[in-house]
Image: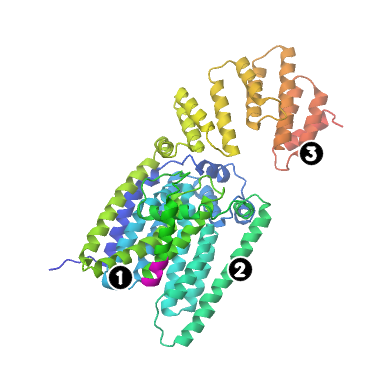
Amino acid sequence: MKFTVRPGLKLALTLLFILAVYFQTIHNPFSRFDDPFIVEHYGINSTISFLDVITPGSGFYYRPLINLSYWLDSRLWAMDATFMHLENIIVHFANVLLVFLIASLLPVSSKTKSVPFLAALLFGLHPINSESVNWIAGRTDVFAGFFVLLAFYCLIRAIQEQSSRRAFFAFAVAFAGTLAKETAIMFIPAALLAVSFWPVVPQDVSRYKIWRTRFLLVPIVVSSCLIVAILVMVYVRGHGNNAVSLLFESGTNIFVRSFEAFGFYAKKLFLPLPLNVAIVEVSSLYAILGIIALSVLVATVRKSGIPGIFLVVAGLFILPALVVATTSITWTPFGERYLYIPSAFAVIGGLELLHRFLARWNSASCFLPIVSIIIIAAAIITFQRGMLWRDNFALIEDIVAKSPSFGVARNEYGILLKQAGRFDEAAKQFKIAAEQKNRENVSRMIRLNLVGMKLLGKQHDEIRRILLSEIGTKADGDVELLKLLNIYDESLFINTSAIKTKRLIVADIIETNENLFLKTRDPHYLYRSGQYALSIGNDKQAAEFFKKTWENASPEAYYREPARHLAEKLGAQ
């Protein structure tokens, strides 16, 4: 008696296998990259409103759905890492189901029932997707992937059934995807490709063409115009301080490294090792592979039909990553997370193409064993990668080993070494980081950390001398160094009893606060100056500081009203 497993049970086992590999992710800590900013921006002390979440121009990227997810994380479970990791896994599961449904629509699925399950497994366990699932900040690709895959599923069903309702829903969902991440825009050329080449045999050809024009081609044009309008609005509202502005105003020729990046990503889809969170440079030889991959795609879509459509769609969703590789939009020019959506289409198209190839050589029986071996290998690699994400120290060591010239990783490694009390090693990492080609803000962070290493174990007088030497003139000094100087001056003030010395220290604190106010426009520095002036009996000077505080502070500032009362009490004019 032949034993068969019901499709529902088989799908449940598929999801259970993926869950077994990713379950450990739930207990991962926040990453050192981007996650701390998210917690700070949306956490307990955040003043972000719902309007801020959905309004263009309020952040570097316009991704209101992602912003909304973080906003809800803060209000529902106080930015708890466990729940935030669970969200990533749940959406990834939804995407696995969508890959299963899309693969079920392929002609090969009627011949080989295992293809949809294998496609779901391979996508769900593909090592290239481990970064997007394990990293909280990587959810942008996971969330956008959900909308893109759902839209593509509805589009294929619309084409097969000539359903106007499904066609409308497909484009509406795709538009929502662009509000999660800009790469969802590529659904438009992907839809045009599918509409043009997907094999259908309608009973009434002329009627079908009219339907296709009205309910598929027209929505493509309308969607394109709507997305362009949103990009322009984001650009205008952002005042030159967001990703769209940077892209529009970049002087970089985006075609210089395009073939190089395309070849690199094409290789990563099928041979993902070595995995690395921070890829800052790739071999120029990938340009040759990029040209070959592009040529293969063109030939595939013309000769293989449906597999070619999926592989070209995967290539289309790689295109935004080429822009990133040739501009300065993100902190790394290359990222494995950018292949999350392309991998879904590449897996589906690749499996059908492999099955056709083996069938042509009378080796279709080898299909299941070959794919099973690939899936098992992928599961092992993805599980190991998840274990690495559980330890920030190990993860950053891995990045430093694979990207030794990446100053950001060196700086973070130095911070962790310092926290572990390995001061000599930390100083060495900061020095190496400072020697790399870093952005201005990164160089500043590294310099501050180097200064911090110099202060270790020093007495107050020596600390102050070092800080003044690093600051130079206070008008030109770094804000963080000025804040640090204030901390030591305030500590010195508390531990000093001589009134003459206290006056000198207060004069120095006030001078520092005035420069901090000019640099940050934060009135709290004026308020602190008023408090110190009052502590040494200089009521007139204190009154002026309290008056300036009240004039510059926002109505919500807790110190504004106290400053007004003190200014009136001390007789400020």
**Residue at image location 70% in from the left, 30% down from the top:** 476
The span from disc 2 to disc 3 (Cα, nearest Å) is: 46 Å
**Residue at image location 52% in from the left, 35% down from the top:** 436
Question: Which residue position holds label 3?
Answer: 551
Callout 1: SS: helix
**Quick one: which residue is furthest to the left in this view?**
1
Question: Which residue position holds label 1?
Answer: 109
Q: Quadrant of the N terminus?
A: bottom left
Within the magenta stretch, is there residue 256? Answer: no
Say left or right for 313 vs 232.
left
Whichever of callouts 2 and 1 sits on the residue coming sooner in the sequence is: 1
- Residue 478 picture location, percent across and down: 65, 31
Q: Is residue 252 above or below residue 552?
A: below
Say left or right for 488 vs 380.
right
Mark 2 neighbour class, 10 Å CA radius: few under 14, some 14 to 19, many 20 or more: few
Callout 3: SS: helix
The span from disc 1 to disc 3 (Cα, nearest Å) is: 71 Å
